[in-house]
Image: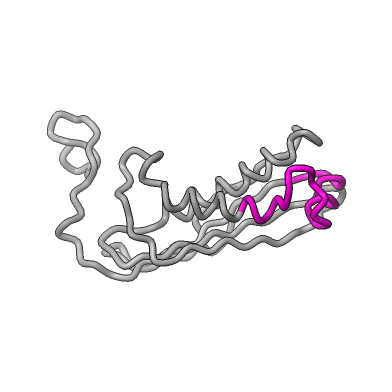
Amino acid sequence: MTDFTHFNQEGRAKMVDVSNKPETVRTAIAHSSIIVNKEIYEKITSNKMKKGDVLAVAQVAGVMACKKTWEIIPMCHPIPLTGVDISFSWEKDKEEYILLITASAKTKGNTGVEMEALTAASVCALTVYDMCKAIDKGMIIGRTYLVEKTGGKNGDFKRDTI
Protein backbone atom coordinates (compact mmCIF):
# COMPACT_ATOMS: atom_id res chain seq x y z
CA MET A 1 0.00 0.00 0.00
CA THR A 2 2.94 2.37 0.44
CA ASP A 3 3.05 2.94 -3.34
CA PHE A 4 -0.36 4.61 -3.16
CA THR A 5 0.01 8.12 -1.78
CA HIS A 6 -3.58 8.46 -0.54
CA PHE A 7 -3.40 5.43 1.77
CA ASN A 8 -1.67 5.14 5.13
CA GLN A 9 0.23 2.09 6.43
CA GLU A 10 -3.09 0.52 7.50
CA GLY A 11 -4.55 0.88 4.01
CA ARG A 12 -6.91 3.67 5.06
CA ALA A 13 -7.45 6.91 3.21
CA LYS A 14 -5.32 9.91 4.11
CA MET A 15 -4.67 13.37 2.75
CA VAL A 16 -1.26 13.54 1.11
CA ASP A 17 1.31 15.79 2.79
CA VAL A 18 2.32 18.38 0.18
CA SER A 19 4.45 20.53 2.48
CA ASN A 20 7.73 19.45 0.82
CA LYS A 21 6.52 20.14 -2.72
CA PRO A 22 7.77 23.36 -4.31
CA GLU A 23 5.41 26.29 -4.64
CA THR A 24 4.85 26.93 -8.34
CA VAL A 25 2.23 28.55 -10.54
CA ARG A 26 -0.35 25.93 -11.46
CA THR A 27 -3.26 26.17 -13.86
CA ALA A 28 -6.03 23.88 -15.04
CA ILE A 29 -8.77 24.10 -17.66
CA ALA A 30 -11.81 21.80 -17.65
CA HIS A 31 -14.80 21.41 -19.94
CA SER A 32 -18.36 20.27 -19.40
CA SER A 33 -21.58 20.66 -21.35
CA ILE A 34 -25.32 20.39 -21.15
CA ILE A 35 -27.75 19.63 -23.96
CA VAL A 36 -31.00 21.59 -23.82
CA ASN A 37 -34.06 21.87 -26.05
CA LYS A 38 -34.88 24.80 -28.31
CA GLU A 39 -37.21 26.46 -25.81
CA ILE A 40 -34.57 26.48 -23.08
CA TYR A 41 -31.91 27.67 -25.52
CA GLU A 42 -34.11 30.57 -26.63
CA LYS A 43 -35.01 31.54 -23.07
CA ILE A 44 -31.40 31.43 -21.89
CA THR A 45 -30.06 33.41 -24.85
CA SER A 46 -32.82 36.03 -24.62
CA ASN A 47 -32.58 36.15 -20.80
CA LYS A 48 -36.24 35.22 -20.35
CA MET A 49 -36.00 32.43 -17.80
CA LYS A 50 -38.27 33.02 -14.83
CA LYS A 51 -35.46 32.24 -12.39
CA GLY A 52 -33.20 34.93 -13.89
CA ASP A 53 -30.01 35.11 -15.92
CA VAL A 54 -29.06 31.43 -16.14
CA LEU A 55 -25.49 31.93 -17.33
CA ALA A 56 -24.73 34.64 -14.77
CA VAL A 57 -25.98 32.42 -11.96
CA ALA A 58 -24.11 29.39 -13.34
CA GLN A 59 -20.93 31.45 -13.59
CA VAL A 60 -21.14 32.58 -9.97
CA ALA A 61 -21.98 29.02 -8.87
CA GLY A 62 -18.94 27.71 -10.76
CA VAL A 63 -16.63 30.23 -9.11
CA MET A 64 -18.08 29.45 -5.68
CA ALA A 65 -17.72 25.70 -6.26
CA CYS A 66 -14.13 26.14 -7.38
CA LYS A 67 -13.34 27.95 -4.14
CA LYS A 68 -15.04 25.24 -2.05
CA THR A 69 -13.78 22.12 -3.82
CA TRP A 70 -11.75 21.09 -0.77
CA GLU A 71 -14.97 21.02 1.28
CA ILE A 72 -16.73 18.46 -0.93
CA ILE A 73 -13.89 16.31 -2.34
CA PRO A 74 -12.49 14.57 0.74
CA MET A 75 -8.76 14.41 -0.11
CA CYS A 76 -8.45 17.84 -1.76
CA HIS A 77 -6.37 20.46 -0.03
CA PRO A 78 -7.66 23.98 0.61
CA ILE A 79 -5.97 26.03 -2.09
CA PRO A 80 -5.44 29.80 -2.24
CA LEU A 81 -6.83 30.37 -5.72
CA THR A 82 -5.40 33.35 -7.57
CA GLY A 83 -7.88 33.22 -10.44
CA VAL A 84 -11.04 31.49 -11.64
CA ASP A 85 -12.77 32.08 -14.96
CA ILE A 86 -15.85 30.53 -16.54
CA SER A 87 -16.88 30.92 -20.17
CA PHE A 88 -19.78 29.64 -22.23
CA SER A 89 -20.45 29.03 -25.91
CA TRP A 90 -23.20 27.33 -27.89
CA GLU A 91 -23.21 24.59 -30.53
CA LYS A 92 -26.22 23.36 -32.43
CA ASP A 93 -26.38 19.73 -33.53
CA LYS A 94 -29.60 18.83 -35.36
CA GLU A 95 -32.35 19.71 -32.87
CA GLU A 96 -30.02 19.79 -29.86
CA TYR A 97 -28.56 22.93 -28.38
CA ILE A 98 -25.32 22.27 -26.52
CA LEU A 99 -23.99 24.71 -23.96
CA LEU A 100 -20.21 24.30 -23.78
CA ILE A 101 -18.68 25.25 -20.45
CA THR A 102 -15.01 26.05 -19.89
CA ALA A 103 -13.65 26.58 -16.38
CA SER A 104 -10.11 27.64 -15.59
CA ALA A 105 -8.38 27.88 -12.24
CA LYS A 106 -5.00 29.22 -11.19
CA THR A 107 -2.93 29.21 -8.03
CA LYS A 108 0.62 29.63 -6.81
CA GLY A 109 1.04 26.75 -4.46
CA ASN A 110 2.29 23.24 -3.84
CA THR A 111 -0.63 21.28 -5.27
CA GLY A 112 -2.58 21.47 -8.51
CA VAL A 113 -5.99 22.92 -9.35
CA GLU A 114 -7.35 20.20 -11.63
CA MET A 115 -10.11 19.21 -9.21
CA GLU A 116 -11.08 22.85 -8.74
CA ALA A 117 -11.51 23.42 -12.49
CA LEU A 118 -13.44 20.15 -12.89
CA THR A 119 -15.70 21.00 -9.97
CA ALA A 120 -16.38 24.47 -11.35
CA ALA A 121 -17.34 23.12 -14.78
CA SER A 122 -19.56 20.43 -13.25
CA VAL A 123 -21.38 22.83 -10.96
CA CYS A 124 -22.01 25.22 -13.86
CA ALA A 125 -23.78 22.43 -15.75
CA LEU A 126 -25.72 21.39 -12.64
CA THR A 127 -26.81 24.97 -12.06
CA VAL A 128 -28.11 25.31 -15.60
CA TYR A 129 -30.06 22.09 -15.09
CA ASP A 130 -31.49 23.34 -11.80
CA MET A 131 -32.58 26.66 -13.26
CA CYS A 132 -34.21 25.09 -16.35
CA LYS A 133 -35.68 21.82 -15.07
CA ALA A 134 -39.21 23.27 -14.79
CA ILE A 135 -39.27 23.45 -18.60
CA ASP A 136 -37.59 20.13 -19.39
CA LYS A 137 -36.11 17.50 -17.11
CA GLY A 138 -34.67 15.69 -20.14
CA MET A 139 -31.54 17.86 -20.36
CA ILE A 140 -28.32 15.86 -20.61
CA ILE A 141 -25.16 16.88 -18.81
CA GLY A 142 -22.31 15.87 -21.09
CA ARG A 143 -18.72 14.81 -20.70
CA THR A 144 -16.70 16.59 -18.07
CA TYR A 145 -12.96 16.39 -18.51
CA LEU A 146 -9.61 18.03 -17.91
CA VAL A 147 -8.40 19.89 -21.02
CA GLU A 148 -4.99 20.89 -19.71
CA LYS A 149 -2.96 21.59 -16.64
CA THR A 150 0.38 23.26 -16.03
CA GLY A 151 2.86 23.21 -13.17
CA GLY A 152 3.83 20.65 -10.59
CA LYS A 153 6.28 17.77 -10.46
CA ASN A 154 4.34 15.66 -12.96
CA GLY A 155 4.66 18.39 -15.57
CA ASP A 156 2.15 19.75 -18.01
CA PHE A 157 -0.78 17.89 -19.54
CA LYS A 158 -2.73 18.78 -22.66
CA ARG A 159 -5.53 16.61 -23.99
CA ASP A 160 -5.16 15.88 -27.69
CA THR A 161 -8.64 14.60 -28.42
CA ILE A 162 -11.89 13.79 -26.72
Q: Nearer the viewer, residue 103 or 149?
A: 103
Instruction: Relative to 10, say whether 130 is above or below.
Output: below
Residue farthest to the bottom? Answer: 25
Residue 93 % position (x, y): 81, 53
Instruction: Relative to 121, say whether 7 is above or below.
Output: above
Q: Residue at x 33, y 46 (%)?
A: 76
Q: In which quarter of the image is residue 7?
A: top left
Residue 54 % position (x, y): 70, 50
Quick check: is 43 in the magenta stretch? yes
Q: Quadrant of residue 153?
A: bottom left
Query: Is residue 112 rendered to the left or right of residue 138?
Result: left
Q: What stretch is highlighted in magenta?
A: 35-58
Q: Which residue is drawn at 45% across and 62% down?
A: 105
Q: Residue at x 18, y 49 (%)?
A: 17
Q: How many labels does the image show?
A: 0
Quick check: is 29 in the magenta stretch? no
Q: Quadrant of the C terminus?
A: bottom right
Residue 24 % position (x, y): 28, 70
- Colour setting: one colour
Query: Is residue 99 rendered to the left or right of residue 14?
Result: right
